[in-house]
């Protein structure tokens, strides 16, 4: 469905996010006809580029980051023509180009500002826009992490933006919410009658969320200040947890959904002081070197002045949600860099059957599991017991009822940013985080971080290419459970 024509101003137009994610996403939406030449993409940054320079960098970004099959010269040509550039330095208005001239003064043209810059520039840019009279009450501003490193700094960033923009104009991106499979979780839960009646502590034993990456962290400068708790748990993984755990919202209207997510965040049992050691494990990968492979450890990748860093590249934790639906159902979360493989999935493990009539059968009935694979090989799988075919008596076997998206659907799966960038133009905040959600998430992770900072113990080490430190296994095995592994 085509969106209204827009002027999309991208601050940080020469940065990595613009090249890797924003330009390719906008190109795909343009190619699919979701918008056309009536719209403009206006790059802005401190660099003194010409329009032609910027257009060349847009073309390069497409060549480099769009799959070859989708690179079509005629479309690229048309797309590049709607891209223009204005040098802007919010702290030096007099040395900046005229952004106002590049924007159209027509209320039918949606005005959006994407701040793909460091958060300390959000407030100066917002104030610059207001001073230059480029702010409109219906304009939208898009921001994304790191939105602070704790509750206090996150409040300061939001206050800075809120000096100019109202909450209904602010689009806080968590790109996990734009992933097809994450939205599918909403469809699975609320477009079927099958799951919701059993989606509670009477039927579910526990939930596991895993976001494992095979890449390392070391060369990305910001990572050492951040660590896995801030980089992945505070945002992406808590958002996933909310979508699994929230009550059914009355509609998919942004605040209806966000109200329910907020209730989950507020019901998370705080992990504080002595509880931190019991319920969380942090790890850092060490290198491997053998004849077959050689992978650097996190310490080896750090510059000299950062050696000895205690930043965690892995976190596993056990969360509890103190409400009626989830009483007694732990949520085990784990995420890390340089793990055995790249896999993100949600595993809902149901309770064992209450009584077995198969005492004499081979193979004991195993509890059902519902697995949502977010990436790669997206799909949904229900593990269930059946009778093994054949005359040899009752033999029970666990088999998957398997839906693979790649096999079922011919369409290409759009990237998260494609959906999110267009939602901004549509004015839909459903898949964006509200300020109170963000702050509730910080409130929950801050005490964990503080306890780690106070602790004299360093993170446990784990070998690159494994599933994390032994403590992560112990964390779940203590409860008589184990991490789900694809059979
Ligand atoms: C980002 C983190 O938000 O998400 C990165 O900062 C991480 O450290 C990335 O690699 C993972 O995203 P995806 O879409 O590849 O799972």
Image (spheres, helix red, strand yellow):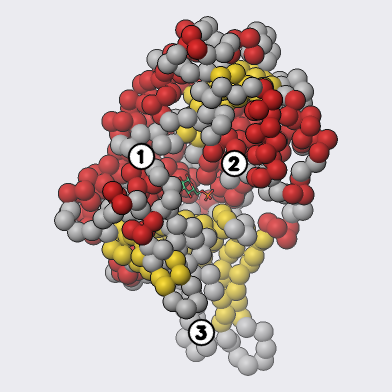
**Quarter where residue 461 is shown:** bottom left
Can the viewer see residue 242 in this picture?
Answer: no
Instruction: Kindly indicate whether the residue at mark 1 contacts the one at mark 2 (C-beta within 8 angstroms).
Output: no
Q: Secondary structure at mark 2?
A: helix
Residue highlighted by disc 2 = 20
What percent of the width, then of the height, locates residue 411?
75, 49
Instruction: Give the side of residue 346 with respect to residue 103, left or right.
Output: left
**Quarter where residue 378 is shown:** bottom right
Q: Secondary structure at mark 1?
A: helix
Instruction: Kindly indicate whether the residue at mark 3 contacts the one at mark 1 (C-beta within 8 angstroms).
Output: no
Residue highlighted by disc 1 = 441
Q: Earlier in the sequence, mark 2 or mark 1?
A: 2
**Quarter where residue 41 is shown:** top right
Residue depicted at 35% across the width and 34% down the height:
148
Instruction: Give the side of residue 138 with respect to residue 219, left or right.
Output: right
Which is closer to the viewer, label 1 or label 3? 1
> Compared with residue 193, is residue 400 higher up or lower down, i.e. above or below?
below
Q: Nearer the viewer, residue 225 or 277?
A: 225
Residue depicted at 69% across the width and 32% down the height:
56
Q: Nearer the viewer, residue 54 or 107?
A: 54
């Amino acid at each position: 469905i085509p969106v209204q024509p827009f002027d999309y101003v991208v601050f940080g137009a020469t940065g990595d996010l613009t090249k890797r994610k924003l330009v390719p996403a906008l190109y795909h939406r343009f190619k699919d006809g979701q918008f056309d030449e009536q719209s403009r993409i206006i790059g802005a940054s401190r660099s003194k580029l010409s329009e032609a320079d910027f257009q060349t960098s847009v073309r390069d970004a497409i060549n480099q980051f769009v799959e070859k099959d989708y690179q079509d010269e005629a479309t690229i040509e048309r797309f590049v023509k709607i891209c223009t550039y204005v040098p802007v330095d919010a702290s030096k208005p007099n040395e900046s180009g005229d952004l106002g001239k590049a924007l159209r003064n027509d209320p039918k043209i949606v005005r959006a500002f994407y701040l793909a810059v460091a958060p300390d520039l959000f407030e100066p840019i917002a104030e610059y826009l207001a001073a230059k009279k480029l702010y409109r009450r219906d304009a939208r501003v898009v921001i994304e992490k790191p939105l602070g490193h704790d509750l206090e700094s996150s409040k300061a960033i939001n206050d800075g933006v809120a000096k100019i923009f109202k909450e209904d104009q602010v689009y806080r991106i968590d790109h996990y919410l734009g992933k097809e499979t994450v939205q599918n979780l909403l469809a699975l839960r609320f477009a079927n009658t099958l799951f919701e009646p059993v989606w509670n502590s009477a039927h579910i034993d526990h939930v596991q969320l895993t976001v494992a990456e095979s890449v390392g962290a070391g060369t990305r400068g910001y990572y050492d200040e951040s660590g896995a708790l801030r980089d992945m748990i505070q945002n992406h993984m808590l958002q996933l947890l909310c979508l699994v755990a929230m009550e059914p919202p009355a509609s998919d209207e942004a605040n209806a959904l966000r109200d329910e997510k907020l209730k989950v965040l507020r019901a998370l049992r705080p992990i504080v002081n002595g509880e931190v050691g019991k319920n969380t494990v942090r790890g850092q990968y060490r290198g491997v070197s053998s004849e077959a492979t050689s992978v650097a450890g996190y310490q080896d990748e750090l510059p000299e002045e950062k050696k000895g860093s205690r930043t965690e590249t892995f976190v596993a934790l056990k969360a509890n949600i103190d409400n009626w639906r989830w009483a007694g159902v732990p949520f085990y979360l784990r995420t890390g860099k340089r793990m055995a493989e790249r896999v993100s999935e949600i595993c809902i493990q149901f309770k064992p059957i209450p009584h077995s009539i198969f005492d004499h059968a081979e193979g004991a009935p195993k509890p059902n599991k519902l697995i949502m694979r977010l990436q790669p090989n997206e799909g949904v799988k229900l593990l269930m017991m059946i009778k093994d075919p054949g005359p040899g008596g009752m033999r029970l076997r666990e088999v998957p009822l398997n839906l693979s998206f790649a096999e079922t659907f011919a369409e290409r799966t759009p990237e998260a940013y494609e959906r999110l960038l267009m939602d901004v133009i549509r004015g839909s905040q459903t898949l964006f985080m509200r300020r109170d959600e963000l702050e509730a998430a910080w409130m929950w992770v801050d005490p964990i971080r503080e306890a780690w900072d106070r602790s004299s113990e360093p993170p446990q080490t784990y070998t690159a290419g494994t599933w994390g430190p032994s403590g992560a296994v112990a964390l779940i095995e203590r409860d008589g459970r184990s991490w789900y592994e694809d059979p």
